[in-house]
Image: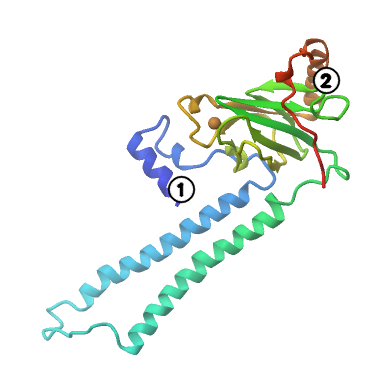
Amino acid sequence: MNFIISLMTNLVLKAEGSWWDGAVPPPVITTNGSVIDSLFMYTTYMNIFYFVLVCVGLFGFPIIYRSAKNAKPYFTYGNKKNHLLVTMIIGGAVFLSIDLNITRMSNNDMLNHFWNFPDHEKEDTVKVEVLAQQWMWNFRYAGKDGVFNTADDVLSNHDLKIPVGKKVEFRITSKDVIHALYFPNARLKVDAIPGRITRLWFQPTQTGVFDIACAEMCGTHHYLMQAKLTVYSEQEYKEWLDEAQHLAKIGNDTANLDNYWGWKWEDK
Ligand SMILES: [Cu+2]
């Protein structure tokens, strides 16, 4: 469905590039983003299958029962036992093969991938705290001491840097209204809600620069909440982090309380 909607939107709005560009989602750059694509493709193919079936009936029956071959019309209310049975079988097949099966697939994806958060004690992971505000994305790394909301934290706006191959967990909140942190290339988004901490994680598989957006209409300048995601090689990331930590140490205004918007990261 997503595929068809974006194809239609692109045909109507004539977005940049070829008409096909808007119909295909941006490349997946994470270990498990492709499960979302599979879900969309499955839904699309099943819809096409039943659409073709409906068309066969819609155009086939008028031809089979045309007046030239059936001079005497046959009247029916369609309420005989076998009519009801056929209706129930078709309805049941749609329900089982589309609704129930995509519910099963999404549930599996949730449990096996998206809610299967990394264990920070056992694995070498990256932790990032995120504060959304009208209209900016603030990112925070714990710094050398490994503790969030201290003077040596690395802070950045609209610019997120992570290493390739490592699991990255984000904990997100908002300063004002509801926003939504959206990584199109990871096929992930989660709401940023004032007074609550939400979270998501992914593991990038390739380096490069990608988009981050706000996926919640959060006010007049909602469109300004675009940020940049840079996936570095491990070496590049290490060099960047060393430099950023050095700059944080000499540059962070430790007296400015606005800089302490972070919180204690707790693993249950
Ligand atoms: Cu926003």
Residue 65 placement: quadrant: bottom left
Name the residue nearer the viewer: 196 or 16. 196
Residue 190 placement: quadrant: top right
Name the residue nearer the viewer: 134 or 6. 134
Rounded to the nearest angstrom, the CA distance separating label 1 from label 2 is: 45 Å
Kind of residue at badge 2: Asp
Name the residue nearer the viewer: 83 or 62. 83
Kind of residue at badge 1: Phe
The residue that disc 1 covers is 3
Q: Residue at x 23, y 83 (%)?
A: 77
Question: Residue 222 location in percent, x, y?
Answer: 49, 28
In the rendered view, does 234 fall on the left or right side of 44? right
Question: Residue 81 location in percent, x, y?
Answer: 35, 89
SS assignment at label 1 = helix
The residue carrying pointer 2 sits among few (fewer than 14), some (14 to 19) or many (20 or more) residues within 10 Å by Cα, namely many
Q: Residue at x 46, y 48 (%)?
A: 2
Quick one: label 1 or label 2, which is nearer the N terminus? 1
**Scheme by which the image is coloured:** rainbow
* Up/down of 59 relative to 173, above or below: below
Q: Residue at x 43, y 79 (%)?
A: 89
Frontmost of labels 1 and 2 is 2
| Ligand 1 picture quarter | top right
Residue 151 placement: quadrant: top right
In the rendered view, does 139 fall on the left or right side of 98? right
Q: Residue at x 52, y 53 (%)?
A: 40
In the rendering, which numbered label is found on residue 28? none
The residue that disc 2 covers is 152
